[in-house]
Image (cartoon, rainbow, N blue to C red):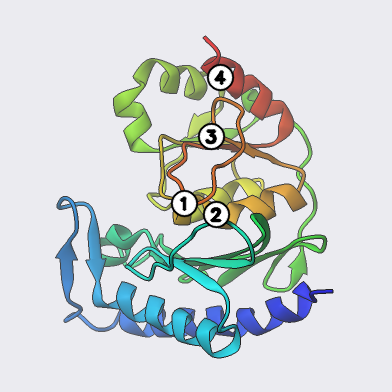
Amino acid sequence: MIDYVAMAEMIRGWVEEAGDILRESLADNSIKVEEKTNPSDLVTEMDRFIEKFYVQKIQEHFPDHKILGEEGTYDTFEDLKGFIWVIDPIDGTLNYVKQKRNFCSMLAVFNDGEPVLSFINDVIHEELYEGVKGHGVRCNGHLMEPIAEHPISEGLVSINTRMEMRDPKRARSIVGDSLGVRLMGSSGLEMVQVISNRISAYVTTPLSFWDVAPGMVMAAELGLKMTRPDGEPIKLLENNPIIIANPMAYEQIIGKFSN
């Protein structure tokens, strides 16, 4: 039987080390920045460095495992059998470059298509969120409590900016039912806001799988609902729009997508 707790303990050290490297990098004003698809879609040498750092650790300790990384580390996936690691070395690269905050580093591990481990490191605030299947979610080692159900009228919500542009009527309806909207520009940190009960829901247009994968095991362990807006499960290795929310807020929001 696989000891996911022991596995998580090892990985935690890697994520902490990557966080140290990223904090130190912010003092370097000579970091090379490149555009990927447009001026707001950036990649830095640190994105590539941190991904390489994770890949080397994985290959050293788990040479038979497959890897999917945002910055180009792709294995061939004929099926979802075995272990698959999903890496987002810097989630919120634009924030990393322009704000030097509001970004995170993320890892998720799947076994036979099931999410079993995940890590979201809020680098600047030094808050490391860790989800282990069957063992709950911890922040800096402290076990987090399941989220109590509550309607969106009692909390804040987050939507990504593309949803406001592409589906403004539905976006305004969701926000209008809540106490207000908060945006951070990092899907990992938006999911952290939900799992820590700082906001009630996060709703998005399609995001890359590495943007949403780390939230899956955390949501399940804390009693949250996390699906596509049509109610279908998150599709592994594909782009996904998502809703992550406590069950009551989730039902209210998903009803808006059935019209």
* Amino acid marked by disc 3: Val
Residue at image location 32% in from the left, 72% down from the top: 47
Left-right relation of 17 to 109: left
* Amino acid marked by disc 4: Asp
Residue at image location 51% in from the left, 85% down from the top: 59
Left-right relation of 124 to 254: left
Instruction: Give the quadrant of residue 26.
Output: bottom left
- Label 4 to label 1, Cα distance in Å? 28 Å
Residue sticking out furthest to the top: 259
Residue indicated by mark 3 = 157
Residue indicated by mark 1 = 209
Of the pair 157 and 84, the residue shown nearer to us: 84
Residue 184 seen? yes
> Is the residue 219 above or below the residue 155 in the image?
below
Q: Nearer the viewer, mark 1 or mark 3?
A: 1
- Label 3 to label 4, Cα distance in Å? 9 Å
Q: Earlier in the sequence, mark 1 or mark 3?
A: 3
Check disc 3: other Cα within 10 Å, few if <14, some if 14-19, many if 20+: many
SS at mark 4?
helix
Residue 189, numbered circle = none
Residue indicated by mark 2 = 213
Residue indicated by mark 4 = 177
SS at mark 3?
strand
Picture quarter with the N terminus: bottom right
* Amino acid marked by disc 1: Phe
* Amino acid marked by disc 2: Ala
